[in-house]
Structures are given as C-alpha cells and as structure tokens.
Amino acid sequence: MFDRVSKFSYFFATEILNLIIKDDKKLFEIIYKFIHHEEINWDDPKCLSEKINYRKIYQKNPLFSLCADKYRVRDYVKNHTQICKLIPLLGVYDSFDEIDFSKFDCDVILKTNHASSVVAIIKKGDEIDMKALKKQMDFAMSMDFGEFSRESHYSKIPPKIIAEKLMTDESGNIPNDIKIHCFYGEPKFIQIANPEHTTNDIFDLDWNRLDVIYRNEPSNNPMKKPKNLEQILKVSSELSNEFDYVRVDLYNLGDEIYFGELTFTPNGGFAKILPREFDYEWGSYWDVKKSVQNQRC
C-alpha cells in the first residue's frame, strides 16, 4: 500500500514518464510493474488491472466516448433507466467567459465533461476568485485528457464546462460515491468512496464488507446497508447491460438514487488491489479478449 510519500513519488514519476515515453504499451508496462510488481501479460490478461490496460490499447467502442462524456451521457441515462434521477443541470458552456454566475441561486459544482477530477465547488454567497477559477477551467478546457491519460476515448469528447446543483444530504454534507463494478450488466462488487476520494470501502452485493484495499485505505466508518440497495443494483444493471465491463457511479440521497458517471477505465488499471487474489477474481468475470475479437469481425 502507498503512504503519502510513495503516492507523491508515483505521481511525479508518472508525469515524467508520460513526457518521455510516447509508446502507450511501454508506458503502461512500466507503471503497471511499479504498482503491481508483475509484468502485464498482454497475450493472456487475467486480473482486472491487466484487462483495463488491455482495453485501453485494444478495445474500441464509440459508446465509451459518448458515455464518458458527463454531458451527453445524461440522454443515455434517460433512455436506459426510469428509477435513477439526474442531478439538476444549471448550464452548459463552451468557455468559462459564457458563465453568468449571477443566475445561480444555489450551491454549484463546475466541472468539465471530458476530464477526470477537474471540479470547482461554489457555495452561494461566497466570494469567488474569478481569476483563479478562470485559469483552472481554461486550462482544463485546453487539455486533451485522453492524450494526457493515454485513454483515447476521452479525446473524442467535445470539451464543455457544465454547472450542476451541488447535491448534499440532510446535514449539508456531500454524499459518498457509490461505485458498482458491473460485468455484462451484472453487478459484482460495490466500492464506496468518501467525498474527498481518500478512502475506499469494498462490499459484496449483500453488503458484507470485504477485507480489501482498493487504491486507498478503507475508512473506519460503519456503513449501514442502504434501504434501497436492491434498486441501486437494478439501476447499475440497467446502465451497464450494453458493456462487458463498466463502473457505474451513483449517489444515494434520501433514498433517491442520482446518477454520477460511467467509468470504463477506472484508475487506468493502476489501482493497487490487496490481497491480489481479488484482482484476479474480479478479472475472471470479464473476457476482454473475446470482446476485442468480436469488434474486429
């Protein structure tokens, strides 16, 4: 597992390697070996981490770009489930300068539709550092996230800024992310990430906590089984049934289920999973090579 120093070292090293090594497979091999202490088996990938990397190189599906687009995916959700709500959309913009902040009458989250982790939370009544916010959003809009991350489906997303209502629970707290990993439309395990994305708790479908470290340490918080867990799993199945593997991200607020996003290459396949047997068990649910072979037919 990583401590703060090793995490910093990893990200710094990754940035340097990304600049130096232009061949995607070579870059993935180096990072994978650093994280998992194993060579990637390109010929016969077995574990989930290998298969995500295999997908990045070989699996091409136009739906990946459409559904990874945080704006266009909203129509996909509407067409595939009736029991999941969309977070209220306050605006869609082609540039930061189009945003009229005076029209927002609630707490807002700004994010780009084509990149990961580029967000800004704006609380109603707070003074906004417009210069810093514009710099953040302009940089994000100018970035080809797919080229940066070597996840090519992001490069096909037309960049936009979207403003959504900031969703909070009855205590005013941002809810945990409920991330359901689904294979062929069937949920297999549940990942609960705190709002800061510094902890991950892993559960099976009956809400038994698993003794697994998935990228981040688990929290020490007891988590009650959601009353609407059956519906959460149903939504996940409905949104994943066109894909061999996808992570369905949801929020649960007052027993209402809200859509977050669909993720096709979680953590780029570089999230450390301990014990390693879980990485291999989860990988056994997915025949990525068959999917690639079928796309070539």
Image (cartoon, helix red, strand yellow):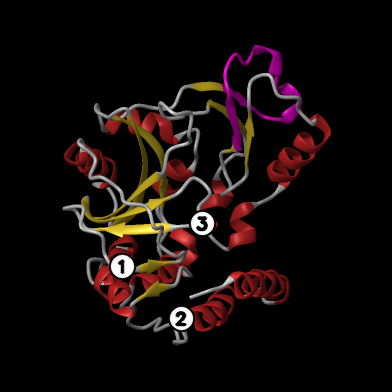
Q: Residue at x 66, y 51 (%)?
A: 144
Please state which of residues 16 and 220 is positioned toward the viewer in this rendering.
220
**Rendered image: mark on residue 288:** 1
Nearest to N terminus: mark 2 or mark 3:
2
Nearest to N terminus: mark 1 or mark 3:
3
Above or below 109: residue 26:
below
- Crowd around label 2: few <14 · some 14–19 · many ≥20 (10 Å): some
Residue 149 location in percent, x, y?
59, 61
Residue 41 location in percent, x, y?
39, 84
Q: CA distance from mark 1 to mark 3?
A: 29 Å
Q: CA distance from mark 2 to mark 3?
A: 20 Å
Q: Residue at x 57, y 63 (%)?
A: 150
Is residue 92 shown in magenta?
A: yes
Residue 166 location in percent, x, y?
52, 28
Tell me the element at label 3: loop
Residue that badge 2 annotates: 36
